[in-house]
Image (cartoon, rainbow, N blue to C red):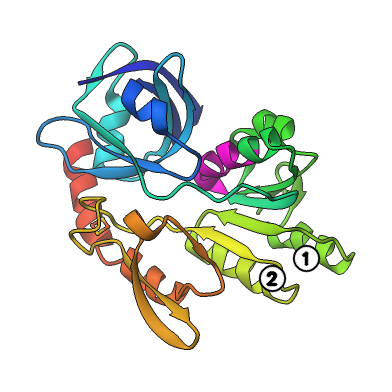
């Protein structure tokens, strides 16, 4: 059993928790994820590691309340326990040797992007961050990104905070001004990452995306997290849980990933209604 050391609401639909999991904290790196079960009959859900404290033995998770399991998880309070917390899983984000990076996060994806920005900064890398949200009420982690970045752009779709528009607006402005980066790393909704990849493509700057497909076992056995890359014109199947979650954005078949991501939407809606009613 894994104790909830701290719980904090970041906005009405996003919660942060510190979980006591010393073995996970010891090995965790930015970009990796855990799989948890809230109780013994619960489904397994993957959540990307949003931070860790090796001394305290804690791992930070940030989740959006979107389905039955995240709703149940959000009902737990500080001092209570969750059943399983397995990890760290997946390949850590490549940060070595990067001197100048642009991080582009969208919505709750910013929780995954933050530890990467922090690690890059620790390594002496110059970080420019762009974080985007639908509206001001959904804004998270602005102060943390400010500390981890040389430059920070905050965007909202409706203009209620920061600048109005999507994350590609400042990205394109920087590219048009001739700004160069060693890499662009983007994490957020699939459609946002697809457009960030499109925008970056014209510059030839490498673009890493963090994929978050349906996962079950998280160990490469079930095939649930498969996605298609197009490598040298050939379609190649990869598993996000063991080959990722990070991939070369230029190779990902986003249209297929979006179609697969919506496969269980109806089922998830029923499960959510059963849990909440
Ligand atoms: Fe089962 Fe990746 S989650 S193969």
Q: Do the residues labelled 1 and 2 touch (CB within 8 Å)?
A: yes
The circle drawn on residue 199 is 2
Q: Which residue is drawn at 33% across and 54% down?
A: 241
The circle drawn on residue 164 is none
Q: In the rendered view, does 240 fall on the left or right side of 153?
A: left
Locate residue 195, reporting x and y percent. Answer: 61, 69
Locate residue 211, reporting x and y percent. Answer: 44, 58
Q: Is the magenta stretch mostly helix, strand or loop?
A: helix
Q: How many labels does the image show?
A: 2
Q: In the rendered view, does 61 fall on the left or right side of 262?
A: right
Magenta residue check for 108: yes
Furthest toward the top, the residue is: 79
In front of the other: 26 or 40: 26
Q: In the rendered view, does 190 fall on the left or right side of 122?
A: left
* Magenta highlight range: 106-117
* Helix, strand or loop under label 2: helix
Locate residue 117, reporting x and y percent. Answer: 64, 40
Quarter of the figure with residue 36:
top left
Q: Mark 1 points at which residue?
A: 172
Few, some or many residues within 10 Å of mark 2 (<14, 14–19, 20+): some
Quarter of the figure with residue 175:
bottom right
Say if residue 98 shows up in the picture: yes
* Helix, strand or loop under label 1: helix
Q: Residue at x 45, y 21 (%)?
A: 54
* 1 shown above or below 106: above
Name the quarter where the N terminus is drawn: top left
In front of the other: 213 or 239: 239
Q: In the rendered view, does 7 fall on the left or right side of 147?
A: left
Say if residue 138 shows up in the picture: no
Magenta residue check for 79: no
Furthest toward the front, the residue is: 97
Furthest toward the bottom, the residue is: 233
């Amino acid at each position: 059993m894994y104790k909830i050391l701290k719980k904090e609401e970041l906005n009405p639909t996003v919660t942060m928790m510190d979980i006591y999991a010393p073995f996970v904290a010891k090995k965790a790196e930015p970009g990796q994820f855990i799989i948890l079960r809230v109780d013994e009959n619960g489904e397994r859900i993957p959540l990307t590691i949003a931070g860790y404290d090796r001394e305290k033995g804690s791992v930070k998770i940030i989740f959006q309340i979107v389905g039955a399991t995240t709703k149940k998880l959000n009902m737990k309070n500080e001092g209570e326990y969750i059943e399983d917390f397995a990890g760290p899983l997946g390949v850590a984000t490549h940060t070595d040797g990067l001197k100048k990076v642009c991080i582009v996060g969208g919505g709750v994806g910013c929780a995954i992007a933050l530890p990467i920005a922090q690690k890059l900064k620790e390594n002496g890398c110059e970080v420019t961050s762009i974080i985007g949200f639908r509206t001001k009420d959904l804004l998270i982690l602005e102060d943390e990104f400010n500390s981890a970045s040389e430059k920070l752009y905050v965007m909202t779709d409706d203009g209620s905070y920061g600048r109005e528009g999507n994350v590609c607006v400042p990205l394109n402005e920087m590219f048009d001004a001739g700004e160069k980066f060693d890499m662009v790393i983007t994490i957020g909704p699939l459609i946002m990452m697809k457009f960030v990849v499109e925008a970056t493509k014209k510059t030839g700057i490498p673009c890493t995306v963090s994929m978050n497909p349906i996962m079950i076992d998280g160990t490469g056995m079930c095939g649930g997290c498969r996605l298609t890359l197009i490598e040298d014109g050939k379609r190649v199947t990869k598993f996000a849980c063991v080959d990722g979650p990070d991939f070369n954005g230029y190779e990902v078949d986003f249209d297929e990933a979006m179609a697969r991501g919506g496969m269980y939407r109806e089922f998830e809606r029923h499960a959510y209604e059963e849990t909440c009613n």
